[in-house]
Image (cartoon, rainbow, N blue to C red):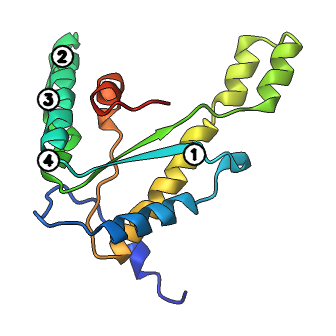
Amino acid sequence: MKNLDFIYNRKSIRKFKDIEVQEEDIIKMLDAAIHAPSPKNQQTWHFVVIQNNELINKIADIVTKNHINLAEMAKEEKQRKLMMNLLSYYTCFRNAPVLVVVYSKEYYMVEETILRDNNASQDIINELKFPNSAAQGIGAAIENFLLAATELGYGTCYMTGPTHSKIEIEELINFIK
């Protein structure tokens, strides 16, 4: 592994070509993702691959609606404008040929159980959970996915903005934890 170009060539792409992503390439990217390290090897990740343009557009519509609602709740005009300026970044996946939604199931921490059994304060438990190991695990998996996509010649964009629409997206795609 002398050449690290797959790392340095990875860029966030927000305008996608109207091309078919081959199923075997998606499988290779997912395989790379699940080979990522995960805290305590719990592999808490779930990947939902969506290739239906109508469904992708419905998800983008949900994100748009919730984003605008949040912007309208802003007490300061500066915040409202910032939120509205970010909308295109939160929905740039609208014309992507593939959307991969990544979730994490609950991360089990034996330390938390021990602390709760010994009546530790919620502050101590919050401090233990602060590094959010589940998020770290899916972050590593997503990075592997993105790097594999780059190596295979695909553009990607890592996004967290649409998380404000998590519940509605889960309902739309019938995601069950």
Q: Which amino acid does label 3 sit on?
A: Met
Residue placed most toward the observer, 55 or 37: 55
Q: Which amino acid does label 4 sit on?
A: Asn
| Mark 4 or 2, closer to the camera | 4
User: Residue 136 — which label?
Assistant: 1
Q: Distance between the residues labelled 4 and 2?
A: 24 Å
Q: Which of marks 1 and 3 is nearer the N terminus?
A: 3
Tags 3 and 4 touching, CB below 8 Å: no
Q: How far apart are marks 4 and 1 (CA)?
A: 30 Å
User: Residue 69 — which label?
Assistant: 2
Q: Which of marks 2 and 3 is nearer the N terminus?
A: 2
Left or right: 115 as drawn, with respect to 11: right
User: Residue 77 — which label?
Assistant: none
Q: How crowded is mark 3: few (under 14 residues within 10 Å), some or many (20 or more)?
A: some
Picture quarter with the N terminus = bottom right
User: Residue 53 — which label?
Assistant: 4
As drawn, 129 above or below 148: above
Query: What residue is at 67 percent from the left and 21 percent from the top?
Result: 126
Query: What residue is at 77 percent from the left and 25 percent from the top?
Result: 112
